Amino acid sequence: MSLLEKINSPADLKKLDESLLPGLAEEIRELIINTVADTGGHLAPNLGVVELSIALHRVFSCPRDKIIWDVGHQSYIHKILTERRAEFSSLRQYKGLCGFPLRSESVYDAFGTGHASTSISAALGMAVARDLKKEHFDIVAVIGDGSFTGGMSFEALNNAGDLQKKMLVVLNDNEMSIAKNVGALSEYLYRMRTAPTYSRIKRDIDSVLKSIPSIGDQVQKTVERVKNSVKFLLVPGMLFEELGFSYIGPVDGHNMKHMLEVFELARQSDRPTVVHVMTRKGKGYAPAEKKAASFHGVGPFAVETGDKLKTGKYPTYSEVFGQAMVELGKKDERIVAITAAMPDGTGLSAFAKTFPERFFDVGIAEQHAVTMAAGMACEGIKPVVGIYSTFSQRAYDQILHDVCLQKLPVVLALDRSGLVGDDGATHHGVFGYSFLRSMPNITLFAPKDENELYQMLQTALQHNSPTAIFYPRSEGVGVEIYKDQPVMEIGKAEVLSFGDSVAIWAVGGMVEQAKKVCRQLEERGVNSTLVNARFIKPLDENLLLEHANSFKHIITMEENVLAGGFGSSVLEKLDQKDLLGTTSVLTLGLPDEFVPHGNRELLLADLGLDVDGMTERIMTFCQKT
């Protein structure tokens, strides 16, 4: 029996001889590599925190103690050690384990995560609640150096230092390797900080100095100033100590013995404490160590080589957007690109390489990215903010207050619009139409294919007010891209086919689905007029009113929640014109619930939004009305 087969819970981990823990770490790495090779997922982040995760569960006692994984893409080891090892092969699969912590999945998942920089705030909230209830347990927030760039982390640190609640923040720093010279200093600081006499000697010196008559206080203040000056020069954790935290580190995150000692020391602290851990992304798997960024989030791959198994037939929308930015950037030096720690995911790496002085990666700081773009737009620059649709939610106020209110020409390129599949509820981009449509002054585009994406970007860059373009995670449909197209007429829809039975208005990625639905309807004797809406806002009012007076049935299709979405805008417009008694409207979109993870096609089928499901719903609707 392998070591891992003996571990079904953290209680089993505590029984294992400490000398066997490095071997257990290697078995866990092997399981993760082989599983993610089949399912896809976040490989490099998890390989970097194997020892860290084992040490946490060895020292702390979950689920009584709470471990909060910031973002959560490094929580696979946590899942394996907390009664889910047997299910691990279902990771990110339809109705299988979620790729992120999920409270409904396990009592060991103390807080659901998926977006960055939330862990310290959540941990502090739990600590306050614990103390109010006069309970006793430990709370740990594990946050990476990337998530630490988010402003919310600093807000939480500031408040935690003020409240002085007992809690532990583990700063997982995987951007730097511990070189020999740094390693020696690290070892020295480790021994100094973790020596049980260190804190006691500091307290004793202060007490002795203060007890000396007349001169004690002055000497003590002088020593304190000197001590602080030296610490600012030598100790890397002074930022945390000034905020009210005890600081331990930096610690080698792959040295199991040191990790256990450090966490045990931190557990005994009665005040907020930061443990600074140095790890290496992709640890233990050569391809991931060499190309950590490529293996951060990865699809299925060959374990032997690290090569991806699936390659798309056509370029992805992200790639088309990235290439369009380069080509348009060559024509207009006012065009700049901004992203929030997603240069590869948004397709902007090529722009960054071509125009390094016009590319800005602000880190995980979406709010700052949007307002920075607003400042640029004030001065005549043409900023394009490349961001995932789900992460744009984090900059709601900045879009509303700093961009739309001032009617500034900022372009929001919202990647991963619609269902994104295996990453699940935290990453589906299905709320963007709704929350942006309510903002005055903004124009909302959604292309039916990659050529239209190119044309919409051209149009948005010429439009002197805020714009947002929604496009999916998937590859394009394979159409040719025409690079010298005229700009679009704002709010003008496109009629793709003509029929006399029903009018179908589809937007974005749903247009391809709608084409197939039209073919099925035709086989059943229903001839459809198909409209590619192209704009969520403004609608093509003239065409819509014409259809309302010509068709008994109008169908809308969108890959967004129905509440406040594209279909809602159609209903609102027809109601304003008192036409809802003239035509009946069926809105097809996502229901008022969070959609779990899984293959996109399976999720659409579950929601009745696959081709067969929509065809049946349209037929039933037409027969009833």
Image: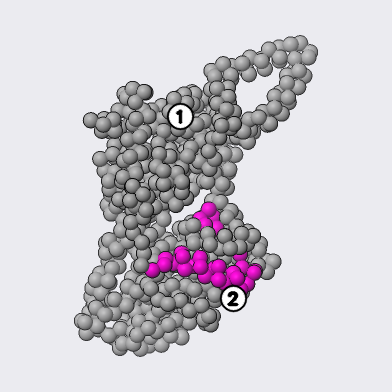
Q: Secondary structure at mark 2?
A: helix
Tell me, for residue 611, which label it has, or none: none
- Tell me if 132 is positioned left or right of 516 in this view: right
Q: Within 10 Å of the Cα at label 2, are there few (<14), some (14-19), or many (20+) other Cα atoms?
A: few
Is residue 274 in sight in this rendering? no
Q: Within 10 Å of the Cα at label 1, are there few (<14), some (14-19), or many (20+) other Cα atoms?
A: some
Look at the picture and state if 581 lies above or below 345.
below
Type of residue at label 2?
Answer: Gln
Q: Position of residue 612 (x, y in %)?
A: 24, 71
Viewer-side residue, 89 vs 222: 89
Kindly identify the residue that appears in the image at 45 percent across and 32 percent down.
254
- Tell me if 300 is positioned left or right of 480 in this view: left
Q: Position of residue 305 (x, y in %)?
A: 36, 49
Q: Which residue is under mark 1?
A: 255
Look at the picture and state if 328 lies above or below 290.
below
- Tell me if 295 is positioned left or right of 278 in this view: left
Residue 334 magenta-highlighted: yes
Look at discs 1 and 2 and give the one toward the viewer: 1
Q: Residue furthest front?
A: 305
Type of residue at label 1?
Answer: Asn
Q: Position of residue 617 (x, y in %)?
A: 25, 72
Q: Give the magenta-colored segment's residue range.
A: 314-343
Tell me, for residue 462, which label it has, or none: 2
Picture quadrant where residue 76 is located: top left
Kindly identify the residue that appears in the image at 54 percent across and 35 percent down.
178
Picture quadrant where residue 7 is located: top left
Kindly identify the residue that appears in the image at 34 percent across and 52 percent down.
301
Look at the picture and state if 182 lies above or below 520.
above
For the C terminus, the image quarter is bottom left
Q: Position of residue 287 (x, y in %)?
A: 41, 46
